[in-house]
Amino acid sequence: MTFPLYVFLIIYAVVFLIYVFFSAFLFYHIFRFGYWDSSTKFMVFLYFLVTIGILLSTIIYTIDIDWSETITLFSDTQFNFSFY
Amino acid sequence: MDQFKYFPNKRPDEEIILLLRRHWHAIVKYFLVLILEVVLPVIVFIIFTQFTEFVWEKGSPISVAVFFSASAYYLFIWLFFFHHWVEYYLDVWVVTNQRIINIEQKALFSRTVSELNIDMIQDVTSEVKGKLATILKFGDVHIQTAAEEKRFIFEQIPHPQEVATRITELHIKQEKKVNSSNPISQMPSEDSSNESNVSQTF
């Protein structure tokens, strides 16, 4: 099966939306039922920091990629890595 | 910080005596799993590139696929860790001078809040089980109520013995307060024959 590379971008966008959706529910619980104390502030800060870090590294990696290029998955040649 | 901000139905003259969460080891356990989940794929990838002809080339279709998969994987393991932290953080036991409140976040969409009056307590037991619990000083406190067959359990809390002692003290204090405000309860208790008479009258 051959796909253009932008299919991965679309799948990633959907995955990230699911991530945002569940994160929103978690934050709803924190702000509705939790105390806004130092440990909550630290964890919320850390959560955003790690999320932005992962997202930013992905964005940086995708610069200069030719999205029209194709990838062939589930063929005999694509994942045929011979061991030494 | 207003401690009563998220407190269910605060009563007049009610004070928070203890606000308890699980011992920190409960969340450290998940943190160690997170580290393992972060490191393990990197090790597998290094081994894979060492022992196969696979060459990581930026922008190549296969490396784009691997990078996106890795990015999605790390997002989700981070989300799961945060979810565990939210569950840990929102599981709270509050001991006030009048009652004990058990707030339990069972899952993302399941939250239970139960309470019992301090004067309903019949028996308080602390339990420290295992080597780790003994070293790190955490354990369970079981609270048996008088009215029902209900049992409150404070799970994996730090210093369970001290907590049990504090609850017993509060119970004695509350009982004295109730007795002093209600002179009938100070009268000597009636014998069992009288009790049976009462039940016959009804």
Image: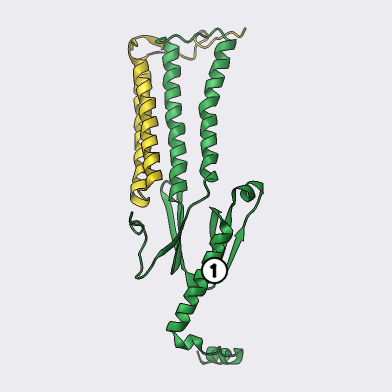
Chain colours: A yellow, B green
Helix, strand, or loop for circle 1? Answer: helix
| Left-right relation of B168 to B59 | right
Of B195 and B171, which appears nearest the observer? B171
In x, y percent, where is residue B18? 46, 60
Instruction: Looking at this view, name the residue that lies furthest to the right.
Output: B131
Q: Where's the N terminus of chain B, which quadrant?
A: bottom left
Residue A50: quadrant of the picture = top left
On screen, residue A26 above or below B198: above
Q: Residue at x 43, y 17 (%)?
A: B65
On screen, residue B68 above or below A50: above
Callout 1, which amino acid? Answer: Thr
In x, y percent, where is residue B34? 51, 33
Q: Residue at x 43, y 35 (%)?
A: B79
Q: Residue at x 45, y 43 (%)?
A: B85
**Residue A35 visible somewhere in the drawing:** yes
| Left-right relation of B29 to A64 | right
**Residue A72 visible somewhere in the drawing:** no
Of B134 and B145, which appears nearest the observer? B134
In the rendered structure, the residue with mark 1 lies on which chain? B
Q: Residue at x 48, y 52 (%)?
A: B21
Q: Which residue is identified by label 1?
A: B168
In x, y percent, where is residue B180? 45, 83
